[in-house]
Amino acid sequence: GDLYLSGYKIIGKIICSQGGHKLTNQLLREVFQNKDNFTIVEIKEKNIPHSLINRKYLRSIA
């Protein structure tokens, strides 16, 4: 839910113990602070199966 507030649909996975709104906000600020941390991908088709997602666009951020 908090990741939705970034304004983007995020493809990835975050595992967190005792996170919360403040920690998520700090994480998003760190990620979006440097353009090397993420890639924006425009997908025009609506219901693309996960198997078609190009894994090279996914980056480990934590």
Image (cartoon, grey):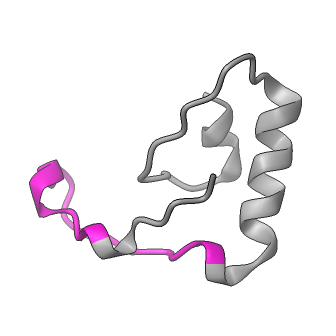
- The one nearer the camera, 9 or 15, is 15
Q: Residue at x 42, y 53 (%)?
A: 11
Q: Position of residue 25 (x, y in %)?
A: 83, 42
Q: Position of residue 7 (x, y in %)?
A: 64, 53
Considering every residue shown, the one lying at the far bottom of the view is 36
Examine the structure image and report whether residue 33 is included in the region drawn in magenta: no
Marks counted in the figure total: 0
Position of residue 12 relative to residue 54, above or below, is: above
Q: Residue at x 81, y 72 (%)?
A: 33
Stretch in magenta: 37-55
In screen coordinates, is 61 left or right of 51? right
The quarter of the picture where the N terminus appears is top right
In screen coordinates, is 54 left or right of 31? left
Q: Position of residue 18 (x, y in %)?
A: 74, 16
In screen coordinates, is 13 left or right of 49? right
Q: Residue at x 75, y 52 (%)?
A: 28
Position of residue 3 relative to residue 20, above or below, is: below
Q: Position of residue 24 (x, y in %)?
A: 76, 37
Secondary structure mostly seen in magenta is loop
Position of residue 3 relative to residue 37, above or below, is: above
Examine the structure image and report whether residue 45 is included in the region drawn in magenta: yes
In screen coordinates, is 57 left or right of 27? left
Considering every residue shown, the one lying at the far top of the view is 18
